[in-house]
Image (cartoon, rainbow, N blue to C red):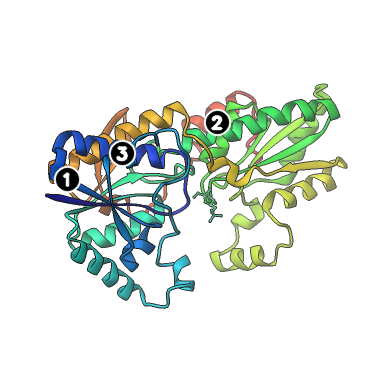
């Protein structure tokens, strides 16, 4: 009997349930009653505290299109959970290892983003059989061209920007739409191109408020009634880009705006004399059903993860490369961020379309 523990960790996104379903259905189809799947509650918290339960095949039915995660999630344990669980990192890892041993898990299936993969790699290095699936709306996981959740979040962020067009037109206004993505600009870049934003501001290309103002003024002179600026939540200015990590942290702590978009709005108001409206869709971008493309991607990832288990190939993340699903060693993924290349093809294409990147 193969005992598999599954957990979802980090910020949720669309497609987590679809991915769990993909793994489970493939395992049940290949192994029948020779496999038992256990759901570990709320990510690594459940693994630390031994909070898991046996799941049945029917638990994985009718969840393909359901948002969130049926297992619950929490942020990865060595940062955020430090506030609530007083143990040292080593002790938390020990507790996880203890749960794996006590439960007799032959393998852990872990769905998560960057932080999650660091911990998954630690577990793997301690001898636990681990297979992971790349999840995040930020698309910032190294080793895979796409993470699941990303394409669904693009749909939502684009729909928001699409809708802003009509109200911006009616009122002849300048709008900023702030898009999630943490320290990476993938989501903003894709949603901005998909919805015809006029300016796209991403962390990888530090912005100049003067250059954004110039782009707005150029449009106004060309008779355009409105401008829409897609701003990544992690955007930084060209002045901030010159600061050391410590100085940047201090500057941001002293910032009185609720988010970077409000600061940019003020800077642009000063430069153009226009009122700038800010719209922040926030966590709405991670909610609801996965888009069909993510349903296919999660199903493919799920099958590949289950096949790694039946082939006893552990210590890998399933990844999309050249439209094939391939295993990538966890040691290569952990701790690396995949950000937008500032001189990459997509940025060049955005510029060729006449979009301003705010620099
Ligand atoms: O990593 C996904 C993400 O939604 C980021 O885009 C965002 O910066 C962050 O999580 C928000 O975190 P929280 O859900 O903890 O507010």
List the residue tagged with mark 2. 155
Q: Quadrant of residue 356?
A: top right
Mark 2 surroundings: few (<14), some (14-19) or many (≥20) residues within 10 A:
some
Mark 1 surroundings: few (<14), some (14-19) or many (≥20) residues within 10 A:
some
Q: Is residue 215 above or below residue 339?
A: above
Of labels 2 and 1, the one closer to you: 1
State which tag comes first along the sequence, 3 or 2.
Answer: 3
Q: Is residue 23 above or below residue 345?
A: below
Write the residue at 80% across / 23% down.
224
Write the residue at 45% across / 68% down.
81
Mark 3 surroundings: few (<14), some (14-19) or many (≥20) residues within 10 A:
few
Tell me if I can see residue 321 in this picture.
yes
Q: Quadrant of residue 86?
A: bottom left
Cα separation between marks 3 and 1: 14 Å
Tell me if I can see residue 144 in this picture.
no
**Residue 293 place in picture, x, y as percent:** 43, 27
Ligand 1 within 8 Å, label 3 CB: no
Of labels 3 and 1, the one closer to you: 3
- Residue nearest the observer in this picture, 172 or 106: 106
List the residue tagged with mark 3. 58
Of labels 3 and 2, the one closer to you: 3
List the residue tagged with mark 1. 35
Q: Is residue 54 above or below residue 89?
A: above
Q: Quadrant of residue 166?
A: top right
Q: Quadrant of the C terminus?
A: top right
| Tag 3 near tag 1, CB within 8 Å | no
Write the residue at 68% across / 54% down.
259
Ligand 1 within 8 Å, label 1 CB: no
Q: Is residue 252 above or below residue 200?
A: below
């Amino acid at each position: 009997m193969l005992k598999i523990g599954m957990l979802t960790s980090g910020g949720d996104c669309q497609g987590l349930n679809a991915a769990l379903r993909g793994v489970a259905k493939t395992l049940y189809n290949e192994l029948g009653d020779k496999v038992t799947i256990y759901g570990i509650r709320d990510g690594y918290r459940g693994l630390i505290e031994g909070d898991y339960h046996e799941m049945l095949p029917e638990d994985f039915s009718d969840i393909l299109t359901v948002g969130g995660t049926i297992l619950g999630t929490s942020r990865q344990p060595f940062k955020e959970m430090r506030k609530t669980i007083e143990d040292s990192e080593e002790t938390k890892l020990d507790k996880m290892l203890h749960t794996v041993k006590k439960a007799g898990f032959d393998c852990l299936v872990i769905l998560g983003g960057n932080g999650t993969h660091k911990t998954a790699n630690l577990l793997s290095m301690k001898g636990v059989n681990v297979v992971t699936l790349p999840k995040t709306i930020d698309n910032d996981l190294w080793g895979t061209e796409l993470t699941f959740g990303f394409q669904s979040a693009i749909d939502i962020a684009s729909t928001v920007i699409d809708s802003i067009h009509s109200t911006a037109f009616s009122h002849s206004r300048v709008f900023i739409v702030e898009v999630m993505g943490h320290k990476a600009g993938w989501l903003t870049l894709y949603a901005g191109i998909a919805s015809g934003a006029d300016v796209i501001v991403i962390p990888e290309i530090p912005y100049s408020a003067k250059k954004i103002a110039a782009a707005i003024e150029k449009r106004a002179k060309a008779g355009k009634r409105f401008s829409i600026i897609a701003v990544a939540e992690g955007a930084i200015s060209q002045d901030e880009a010159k600061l050391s990590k410590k100085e940047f942290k201090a500057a941001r702590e002293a910032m009185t705006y609720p988010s970077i978009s409000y600061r940019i709005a003020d800077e642009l108001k000063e430069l153009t004399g226009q009122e700038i409206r800010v719209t922040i869709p926030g966590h709405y971008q991670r909610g609801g059903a996965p888009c069909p493309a993510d349903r296919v991607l999660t199903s493919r990832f799920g099958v590949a993860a289950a096949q790694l288990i039946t082939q006893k190939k552990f210590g890998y993340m399933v990844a999309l490369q050249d439209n094939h699903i391939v295993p990538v060693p966890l040691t290569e993924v952990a701790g690396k961020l995949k950000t937008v290349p500032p001189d990459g093809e997509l940025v060049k294409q955005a510029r060729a379309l006449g979009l301003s990147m705010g620099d």
